[in-house]
Each structure stands twice: as structure tokens, then as C-alpha cells.
Amino acid sequence: MQTPITPFELGARHRHRVRSMLWLGAGVMTLMGLGWSIFFGMTGAWFFVALIAVFIAVGIGVGVLTYLRRTRLASYIFIAASFVIVCAVAWVLDVPSSEEPRTIHLFLLFLALSSGLFLRDEPLPFRLAVAGTCFAAFVGFASTNAGLDSVYALPDSVRVVGTWLNTSFSIIAMYTLVHVMVSDLAETSALGRELREGIERGEFFLLYQPQVTSQGKVLGAEVLLRWQQPERGLVGPDEFIALAEKTGLILPLGMWTLGAACEQLAQWALNPHTAHCTVAVNVSAHQLQQADFVGQVQSALERTGARAQLLKLELTESVLAHDLDDIIAKMAALKALGVGFSLDDFGTGYSSLSYLKHLPLDQIKIDQSFVRDVDTNTYDASIARTIISLGQGLNFAVIAEGVETQQQRDFLIANGCHTFQGDFFSKPITAPEFAAFVARQLP
């Protein structure tokens, strides 16, 4: 039996396919440019040779960036430069006649479709705009004889060669692209089905990472989701959360996590050692955008009997890129129930001071990327001090995540941060282990 592909492997294969297509695109651009530059050089048309040199330079540049794994930048340059070059050639050089049709615009179809592969991780409106622009240009050039009537228009004797070359290369590129995108879609669909079945079979469970003060008191824990996949074993969130976001499965998965966390809160309330402990649950932008999100949280609290005051919802900064007024209204409604809010990964995304003063937050979290080298890197140390000072000025509690060493802890305490989360105190543990951890910290 073939071992199923993991979400991590899926992402790696997708990146490999993108690089392969960029290599193909760069190769086609470079080879076609070299071929045409030789042709025009033999005919003494040095103006065209100089013009095509730009075409070759772009192809080489995309190839170099792809080799350096600057895939996103290479994709942007390839799509933008190719679009400009194709449209310019179609308008100035490849002007159709009654004998020979225009063919360079065929590459616009390849660009429109390839943007779905190259820009898969970009916002949907942007991807649609890129593809739509390419399709619109293709329709315009295919449906009209529009072109610049100038001395630069290529004669039919030259363009007949271009017709064969452009058609052949565009067909090869389209065939390769379709093959790559079908493979990508098939693997994503299979993994999405596996993820959905995992939710239905109850393969997910929660771990809890303690949040402690500088005096050693345990305030609560952050909920961390894990997937116990029968054939692959334990799967971390880095391997499935992004897929859950793309497939929409983050909604049922997020609601299950919220419900399970509330059930745990209700159980801890029966233990005098853990009755005071809070639980922090990460909420995705997709969940917060649901019209009935407030009702979903309220229903989970009422169904489990958990105290709203002990539930803390953690929002990432990417959430703030959406309808801020709607977010604030939902946060205010949940705050009225007693639910608290923490801004996760602070300093890495979209947040600004203007946002912070309007959001009804209780806490901001210093991202672990700043904590990791806070005791050795002056840049990270300066950011950490600024976040602590900002939190104090806005009356937000400040917690540092990813604390792994005594030196990091001491630096944070010296600069006014007294709440921590990280492996220095405890790795993520099960609920019974958490209760035992809390008991051990009691005086």
C-alpha cells in the first residue's frame, strides 16, 4: 500500500512544481529570445536584436531567482514582464495581415492559467485580477487586428516562422502547465479528503502549554491542536492548518477545538488546583468572519458550562486585514459575555497603533521570532522592549511565547514582562499532565 502524502510533502511538491514551471518559462523565454536575436542579427536588424536582449535578460533573471529559491519574486517578475513583452510584441511587431494571423498572444493564455499556480498563496482578488487581465488582453488581440502601423511591424515572410514557433512553444507550455496543475489538484483533493475524514473519525486532540508568571504561578494554558493520523502518526499543525484554511475545513475543526477547550475548562473547574486556569484558543480569520461566530462561542460556553471569564480567544494579526468594524463588533459582544482576547504573533503582520486603540484586547503576545534571540540580538531586544512598553501604555497584559532559556526569561523580566509560555517551563502536555504540573507549582 502506497504511503499517503503528508501536508508537508504536499507543500514541498507544490513548491517544486512552481520552480519547475518557472524554469520552463525562463527557458522558453531565453531560447526564443536567442533564436530571434540570431535571426535578426543575420538580417542586420540590430534594433530588434537590442529589443530582444531585454527578453533574454528577463528569462535569465527569472532562472537565477528560481535557482536562489526566490520563488515569489521570480513569479511576480515572470508574469509581469511576460505580460508586458507579449502585449508589446503583439501591438508593435506581430501585427496581423490578411496572409498571416497574430500568434504571440497565445502566450497570454499560458500566463492567465499559470498565475493560478504561481500565485496560489496570494489573496483571491489579486489572483483573479491577474488572470482576468491576461484573458482580457488575449480576447482583445484574438478578436481584432489592432496593432501599430509602423516600420517596425514584421513582414509576413518573418512572421510565418513566428507562427510556427509561437504556436508550438505555447502548446508545449500549456500542456506542461495543465499536467502540473492536475497533479497539484489531485494531491490537494486527496489530502483534503483525508483531513475531512480525520475530523469525522475524531483523530484530532488537544495539548496544553502552560502560561506562567515570573513567580512560577500557572495562569492557564494555550490550546494546541494535534492530529493523530493512523498511517503517519502524530502530525503537527504546521502540516495541516494551511490546508484546512484553503479547503474551508478550518471551520468545523475550529469549532471542535473551541468546544473541546470549553469542556476542559468545565472539568478543570471541578479541581481546586485548576479552577482558576484560563484557556487560550486560536481563532482563524475564517471563523471570525462567520456571521454567527458570537452565537457559536456562546453556545459552546452554555453547552459545556464553562466560565466565559476563563476563555481567551487568540487572534492573529492577519485577522485585522479584514472588516475591522465587524471584528470589533463581534469582539465587543463576546467581551460583554466575559470572554477575553489576546493578539497573537504581535509585530509580525498587519497591526498598527490605530488598530490597537480600537480593539478591545486584554493581552498582546510577543512573537517567538523576537524572543528566540532576544538576549543576543539587539534588533530583537529593541522590538521586545517596545512591545512591552506599548502593552503597558495601553493597559494590555503582555506575554512572551517561545521562551526556551533562562537568559531569555531573565531579559524579559528585567524589561517588564512577567508572563511567559515556552519549553523552558513546559512543553505542550495533555490535560491530566497539565493538572499535575499546576499542582507541582503550588507552594
Image (cartoon, rainbow, N blue to C red):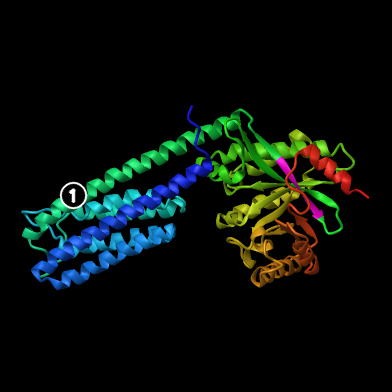
What residue is shown at x 69% (from left), y 41% (from top)?
297
Q: Is residue 31 above or below residue 17?
A: below
Residue 308 vertical placement versus 36 (above, below): above
Residue 174 in sight here: yes
Residue type at numbered disc 1: Thr
Count of number-bearing discs: 1
Measured as percent of width and height from the top left, residue 365 is found at 70, 58
Q: Secondary structure of the magenta portion, mostly?
A: strand
The image shows residue 279 at horizontal and vertical percentages of: 75, 46
430 left or right of 56? right
Pointer 1 local density, CA inside 10 Å: few below 14, some 14–19, many at least 20 = some
Quadrant of the image occupied by residue 195: top right
Magenta stretch encompasses residue 180: no
Is residue 293 shown above or below 87?
A: above
User: Which residues, given as a range, are shown in magenta?
Assistant: 207-212
Query: In front here: 253 or 36?
Result: 36
In-front residue for pair 94/13: 13
Residue 180: quarter of image:
top left
- x, y percent for residue 367: 66, 59
- Residue 295 visible, this orientation: no
Secondary element under disc 1, as helix, strand or loop, is helix
- Relative placement, left or right, of 414 versus 341 is right
Which residue, given by chain and number where applicable, does mark 1 sit on?
167
